[in-house]
Image: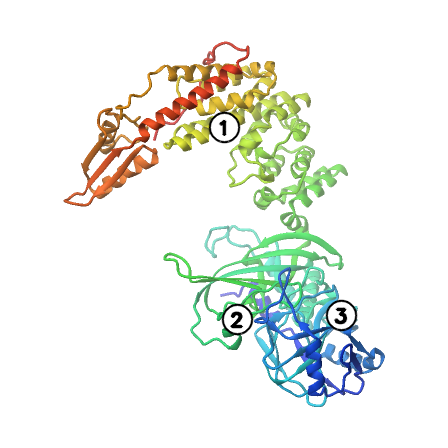
Amino acid sequence: MTTPPLERLATLLGGVSAPGSFSAQRKAPVGDLRLEVRGVGPLTLPVPDEQARQLGAIGRPARYGRGERTLLDPRVRDTWEIPRSRVRLDKRRWDKTLVPVLDLLGRDLGIPSGCRLEAELHSMLVYGPGQFFAPHQDSERDDAMVGSLVVTLPSSFTGGVLVVRHGGETATYRSLKGSLSLVAFYADCRHEVRPVKSGHRITLTYDLHLRGEPAGAATSGVPPATVDAAAGCVDDHFTTALPPPGRSPDAAGGDPPRRLAYLLDHEYTARGLSWSRLKGDDAVRAAVLREAADRTDCDAVLALADVHETWSCFEPEWERPWYARRRYGRWDDDDDASSGEGGSAEADGYELGELVDRSVTLDYRIDPSGEQAGSLAASVGDDEVCASTPSTDLRPYASEYEGYMGNYGNTMDRWYHRGAVVLWPRRLAFAVRAEASPSWAVDQLRARARAGDVAGAREMAATLEPFWGVVARDEQRRGFLAKALAVARALDEPALAAMLLAPFRVEMLEPGHAPKLAALVDRYGEGWARELVDGWSRRPQPWAPGGRDRPTWARSLPRLAEALLAAGGTGASTARLVVEEAWRWLGGEIDHGRRLAAPSHRGRALGELARPAAAVLEAAAVIAATDLRDEALAVLCEETDDLLPCLTALSRAAAALPPARRTAAGLDAVARHGAARLEARLARPPRADDDWSVEVPPGCRCRLCDVLAEFLADPARRSLEWPLAKDGRRHVHGRIDGAELPVRHQTRRTGRPYTLVLTKTAEVIERDRQSRRHDETDLAWLRSHEGSGAGPPGRAAGRRAPRRAPPP
């Protein structure tokens, strides 16, 4: 079986390494380090015990960073910090020792030739007996910062070992008797200071900055055959078709991948990501990929990768180490806390099983020229990602365990930050960037069309079809739809225009879009526009872009209709298309609301449709669509009481309209119809105190429900004892609770079957009284706001209301 190209590439690059490590130690004589601490005076090296105690006395408890917070917690970091403002160094003398040692440490870390390390003092730290710093990761506080330097002064102490970890490797560093110990490590390495057992550990901590530019090609030490093989892997990757989505791996007919994302070993910040500041093996591997990209006519960019993995796992059973027991009794071996602004998280410490799921999101930052490409976030699939070092060998910045929950759980979610090199064929450059930034893509299409290259714009737009429906629907940038409408017209190709606009929703239409939408209809015809608007209206989504749902959008229909009329030409017919779609949606919502069994849910649902209904009627009046208005009125003014919650709320919503607009929209007729229905209800005699009849809810008419209906309709019968099996009792319970009937149901658990006892409550009478009071209030309001207008409402000749589904 042939090894997939990505596996070959990961193995190949895994064998490419730079001459350096993630951490290194050098020693230096103490003679050139002359320092004085305000409040203590000049330090003697090795530091005497008395002076060490004085340093601890003037120090302040050291803080640490977690996310954007700076915290003080001795269970995480227990040490004394002396700020650099109190430390005075003879810099000229010290640099005679420090600069040459930094050159050696840079070589140890694999810093590229032509670059050098510079050290900036951060603070002095003093660790007394029992003090420590739990595993943590330093933040890159400057764009040029790549690592940290710890200079341990000679003094009398035991313990206090510095442990540095990265990529599954661990390095342990102890102090050097009679000499300065200088330990350098990359900033994304996790490290800790184990507890001091006796005496005082005193250190100077520095930020390491990388200066200069690499001299020569980073691949100079890589065999040419390796670069050739990498180029072959890249070429194979972009020419091997993938199986279609949802098909078996052996299925044919798919397209080749559009990207290749190689995950680097180190973590980088957005401001610190640079081709010239890649760390260790990352630098040479990235250089190999860049050369392979040039040979295969591909672009290459640097990116930040957020990796999320879900694993099956098992809870740890081993005994936890000292700091696990110290902090809340729950730490594990690699708990961490960031010493700067960068975030961090506790490690999980669980035994991982199988990988359940993985997602990788890229944020492109640096293009091949070294310029920032901006934020172009995009998700990539497993068939586009490879790594020589699996994420499990690295430290997650966050993890979350889900215990067994019956049908899921015993899983561990882990999140990682990693650098990445991303490649794509130059012929697909537009499509790749478009997938990451739909708004950018529309800008490029518009610029190409404005420049007169409509054919080129069409060719570019055609490459969007495989993914446009997914990425464009989530684009939130302001003005996106307006630009897309303009580009769709400029393409002068109905199929491409429809594809470009298909992902949008009708809720995104605003009055400002009217001229462009009308121009589109003028270009492509009403049939094309009807299909487009119908698709916008039917597109299901759990939320609407821009925070507007359908009812909220519907309230803006009159202004949208006015704007479309003002656009002239086909604006009037376009407005009718939009209003028709709005009424189709509203009619369906009314049907749905009327079928709700629970009165409270039904009343609330229909009441919430009042403002959209008023807007639809008003919009129909704006465009003089009397037939559409009458069709809506025929539904709203049916001879039934179930729409009263909507009618009264609708009349209140329309009260602020000018009388002429209210009359033209038929809203006066709605108000009169509502008043007539209320008068008819109030004309009925009030319920007698001994009338216990309950209105039978619509719905099921099975044998059990027939018995229930007979009991509910009986005005003299208040209780029913009903021997009934479990399934029957459950069904009756559901009918009573679902319809919010004023009936208490209890089960007497004696005999077989058990007896279901139903009892009508006093709420039967109280509900009737409350309903009359509400009707009186609504009728009084309607009468006080009566106005002149249309005649009695009724069905328009030749028009039928939207077909209603039968009751459930």
Query: At numbered mark 3, what does the secondary structure look like: helix, strand or loop?
Result: strand
Task: Give the class, few, some or many, for how many residues have Cα within 10 Å of label 1's Cα (few <14, many ≥20).
Answer: many
Task: Give the class, few, some or many, for how many residues have Cα within 10 Å of label 3's Cα (few <14, many ≥20).
Answer: many
Residue, disc 3: 210
Which three-letter amino acid code belongs to the residue tagged 3?
Leu
Residues under labels 3 and 2: Cα distance?
Answer: 36 Å
The residue lying at 83 percent from left, 78 percent from top is 91
The residue lying at 73 percent from left, 38 percent from top is 449
Mark nearer the N terminus (3 vs 2): 3
Q: Residue furthest left?
A: 751
Task: Measuring from the top left, give residue 524's x and y in whole percent.
Answer: 63, 28
Nearest-to-viewer mark from 3 and 2: 2
Residues under labels 1 and 2: Cα distance?
Answer: 55 Å
Residue, disc 2: 327
Query: At numbered mark 2, what does the secondary structure look like: helix, strand or loop?
Result: loop
* Closest to the observer, 512 or 515: 512
Task: Measuring from the top left, give residue 3's x and y in whole percent.
Answer: 53, 66
Task: Measuring from the top left, give residue 537's x and y in whole percent.
Answer: 53, 32
* Closest to the observer, 443 or 635: 635
Q: Is residue 612 left or right of residue 268?
A: left
Residue, disc 1: 609
Q: Are marks 3 and 1 in contact (CB under 8 Å)?
A: no
